[in-house]
Every structure is written in C-alpha cells, then in structure tokens.
Amino acid sequence: MREIVIISGKGGTGKTSVMASFSYLGGKDLVLADCDVDAADLHMLMQPRIETTADYFGGLKARIDSDHCKNCGLCKDVCRFDSISVKEGIHGVDAMVCEGCGYCQRVCPAEAISMHPEHVGDVYISQSRVGSSMVHARLNAGADNSGKLVSQVKSEAKRIAMELDRKMVLIDGSPGIGCPVISSLTGADYVVLVTEPTQAGLHDLERIYELIKSFNIPCGCIVNKFDINIKITRRIKAFMHTKGIEFIAKIPYDEGFTEAMTEGLTILEYDQNGISTILRNSWERIKVLTQG
Amino acid sequence: MNIAIASGKGGTGKTTLSTSLATFLSQTYEPVLVDLDVEEPNTGLLVRGDEVHAQDMFKLVPEWTGNCSLCGQCRDICNFNAVIQTGSSITILSDLCHSCHACSELCRESALPMVQERIGVLKRFRSAQLHRVESILDVGQDQATPLIAQTKDYVSEHFDDHFIKIYDCPPGTACAVVEAVKGADYVILVTEPTPFGLYDLKLAVELIRKMGLEFGVVVNRSGIGNDDVLKYCRDNWIPILAKIPNDRRIAEYHSEGTLISDGLQFLEGHLGAIENYLDLSVVAGAG
Ligand code: SF4
Ligand code: SF4
C-alpha cells in the first residue's frame, strides 16, 4: 500500500480541487483521507455518506472544583499560560487558553483541580460519491492538537486500506510547515506539491521543500495557474530542476475550477477540454512514479 | 487600535488585503503591519522596507544537568511526554515541550534548569510611513503559537496604543489563530464567494463569536461562485466591509509582488470604505 500526500505550502493554490480530481480518477481503488483538518473542504466535492462517527478528544484541560477550592491562588501563580483567572472571588480556568500541562493540579493543596480530555471534534468514516472509502474530520473552531487529529485520520485510512486491500491512500494535506503538515508527511511514500507562480507560492514552496527533504520523501510538483506569471513559473521549474523534483504538469488559470466547485463537481466532470486532459495525464504519471 | 485580518481558509487574499490596507493607511497615518503568519510570512514579498532590527526568538525548555538522583518525577510530571528516562540519563524532547516549567520548578534537586532554544527570528522594517514586524518560524519547529505570542508582546512593547496595528493572521481556525486574534479590537475575515469559502467562513465566524470579538467580512474575488456568502452574512447580521471584484490583473500584480506599487488603484475605493467603516481617524489622531 502506498501513501501519497498532496500539499501546497500556501493556501488557495487549488490543492483540494486537484485532490478531488485524482479522487475521481482513482475511483474505488483509493482510500481518501482529508488531513487538511482546519479547512476540511474535500467533502464538498466528494459528498461522502457518513457510515461511522467517532469522537475526537484533544488535549487535557484543567477544571477547578469550586466546592473544594480554598482560593489560595497557587495555581494561578504557576500557570505559565495565564489560563487561570479570578472572577467574583472564584478561581476558574479558561479552557480556550489552557495547555493542559497539569502544573496547577500538582500544586493545588486542596486537590480541587482535575484534568479532562476535551471533546473537540469528530472523525468520520464514509463512502465517497465516487465509490471510495473516505476518512475525514471536523475540528471545533479554536481547538488545538490538530496534528494529533491528522495522525488519527491517517491511521484510520491506512487501516481501511489494509482491510479492503486497496493499493493507495490519497491524502489531502494541510498548509503551512507546522505540526499538522509534519503529521501529514510522516510515513508518506510520495508528495505531490501543488503550487502557483506567485512570489508567495515560490517562497512557500522553498520552505515546504526543506521540510520534505528532512523526511527524505520523493516528490513531484504541479504548477496551477501557470500563466498568471510565466516568469515565476520558469523560476519554479528551475528550482525543481536543481532539487531533483519531478515536474508533473502545469495548469493554466481557469475559472472552471471555481465554477465546478460551485456545482459540487470536480473539474473533470465539468469541463472536458484541456484541463481534464492535463489532470488525467498527471494522474497516470503519479501512478507510475509511485509504483513500488 | 488592533485590527486582525484572518480567514478560515488560506489563499483567499488575506495577505493582499493586509498589505494593501497598511500601505493605503500609511498615506494618512503611520500604521504597523505585523505578520503573524509565522509558518509562511509573505507580507515582505509585497511591501518593502529597510530592516532596522532583527533578533532571534526563543522558547524555554528544560536542560538536564546530569546531576540528580534519577527519581523519575520529571518524566511522570510532563503531560506531553517530553521527558524520557533511559538507563541513567534524562533526555528532553524539546519539540514536544510546551514550556510549562513544571518539571523544572518541581525538581527537588534543581537538575532541570530552563534554557533558551531558538524557534525563529523576528525582524522589523521601516519604509516612509509604514512599520512592519514579521516573525518566521524555523523549519522543523512545529509550534507556531509561542512565536506568535512573543511577536505580539514585542509589538505592544514598541508601539503604543496610538498606532494602528494591522495583524496578518495565520489561516484556519486552530490554536495559532486564537493566539493571533486574541485582544484585537476588530477582526476582518476575508473570504471568497464559493462553497469552500463559505464553509471555512462559518468556522471562522464560530471562533470569533466564541471569543467575543467584533468582526466584519471582506468578500474577495466577488463575482465568482454564487451568492451564498452574501446571503449568509445578511441572515446572520454580519457587516460586509467591502466586495473586491474578481480581476485577473489583481492576481497578476500580486504574483509579481507589485500590487502595491502598480495595482493599488484597483483597491483604493474598497480600502477607503474599510477605513471609514472602522472610523480610524478618531483612534489615530496622534499617529
Ligand atoms: S493545566 Fe497548565 S495551562 Fe492549564 S490551567 Fe493548569 S497550569 Fe494552566
Ligand atoms: S517544561 Fe513542561 S512540557 Fe516542558 S518538559 Fe517540563 S513538564 Fe514537559
């Protein structure tokens, strides 16, 4: 089984549209995992039918039992995150800020503080409209620990792929270079970078590449909207060349992506001309590149 | 006045708006643009300036002195599994450490003093009437939140309340965004009128409402997609500060990093509308 991650560094490059197109082309042979848990949008194009829902618990949060609290204020003194405040003479924890370190619990002489995992989202196992199994999640606004959620989504997807003997897990990764994307990349066999020819796109590509290199994962690149700036497209190509990144395809600027998305469709179902052909060829190429 | 510019989803034009708004306001005031998208700070690609200051940024992590009874308490204390004990030594996995100080301060033998570890670098720039502060997270560091918090501290120490501060926040709705928008006087959520845009906007609205902050929406690339975002805002009493039309030329200027010098006229009317809406002339009298 191969694990392929699609990431972009920068948001808005069309990563999820590309992901949905490959999901459509791969059909039921794939297991899909939406690891872009902060902006989980794949479901809008794949209209999954949810089969099972599991609770997702994030980190621990402190809770102060006001019946036992003696208002000594020791907890407030040790908390490095300013999570504890006194309102009308009562000590309380701001769950949004609490990091769950448990320091307050350890120093409370009245044993009034306990730690509780917080229910911050759900993990779904579904059937996508193109016949594949799909694992996705919903994370409450403001929750932390999305890296842990990414790992959970991925391991569910892998488990399903093993059970159903599917050859490939296709992962929609998160933007950025921080903890969720590090979790997305861990254990991947191949990375598809979707970028755009802007100064920001190139800058983020260079940063994300450093991260991928440290994981030692082979990767290829798709440049979307290549014609909005041919000069930068050339620079991206040159960058990829020196780094040995495969140049998979370039896609012209096309409002069709947005129009298709508005209809809840992949671009392949919406427009049968040039872009579909480019994406079909890219998908074939990726299959070859990732054959183990 | 602290204005946070955020968006549920990346790539909606958040940085385009924050840089052009800052530049536009610098014609009248002396604003400070703060790049809190520390994983991918891009404001510097759009507004130039001379570097006037740079400093390394650190987080505090415990360091084992090697001199203790190996009681194992630190390992038990750490809720993040950042302390491991192998044979006769203690190892700190600093990536996992949240700098809570518990293991260090509770160690009876003072064998775990907290020491600095670099997580990124902060830089400050200046051009005519515009200040810019950005922090960039070192690749491989996975916690953006402490760097965001420290960057905000730096800004409040160096620029008092008379300055209009514009914070370019990280995308999404996770903990880093909470840290970035915390304490803002006004939050501008940038979105696109598409199903993805709407879905992510709803999450962002949920977050901002939970935090009890005042906010409004800027619709970027107006004209694409459908009217659902407008309808959602109307139904939920959310003010729309501006609708910036979809124009391929904006994308092209943006790509080149010359939006501010060559393409600002496209946006000026909208930026003026935002300025009026926020009533900045009152706050920034002394700016
Ligand atoms: S668990 Fe840690 S962060 Fe949370 S309130 Fe207690 S000391 Fe503060
Ligand atoms: S400071 Fe806190 S998080 Fe860091 S190693 Fe010690 S107990 Fe763990």
Image (tube, coloured by chain):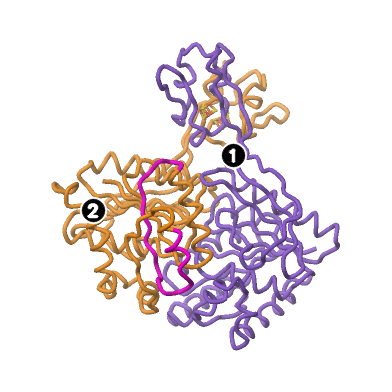
Chain colours: A purple, B orange
Label 2 environment density (alpha carbons within 10 Å; few <14, some 14–19, many ≥20): many
The quarter of the displayed image where residue A174 is located: bottom right
Q: Residue at x 60, y 71 (%)?
A: A264
Q: Can residue A244 be spotted in the picture?
A: no
Q: Earlier in the sequence, mark 2 or mark 1?
A: 2
Residue nearest the observer in this picture, A41 or A165: A41
Residue at which label 2 appears: B31
Q: Secondary structure at mark 2?
A: loop
The quarter of the displayed image where residue A88 is located: top left
Of all residues, the one furthest to the front in this rendering is B235
Residue nearest the observer in this picture, A150 or B272: B272
Q: Residue at x 44, y 43 (%)?
A: B179
What's the residue type where badge 1 is placed? Leu
Residue B220 in the image, given as x and y percentages of width and height: 39, 67
Residue A169 in the image, given as x and y percentages of width and height: 74, 63
* Side (left or right) of B105 relative to B66: left
Q: Can residue B25 be spotted in the picture?
A: yes
Q: Which residues are magenta?
A: B210-232
Q: Residue at x 35, y 60 (%)?
A: B240
Residue at which label 1 appears: B96
What's the residue type where badge 2 is placed? Pro
Residue B105 in the image, given as x and y percentages of width and height: 52, 21
Q: Quadrant of ligand 2?
A: top right
Residue B2 in the image, given as x and y percentages of width and height: 30, 46
Is ligand 2 closer than 8 angstroms to the Cβ of mark 1?
yes
The chain to which mark 1 is attached is: B
Q: How far is mark 2 from mark 1, CA to CA?
A: 37 Å
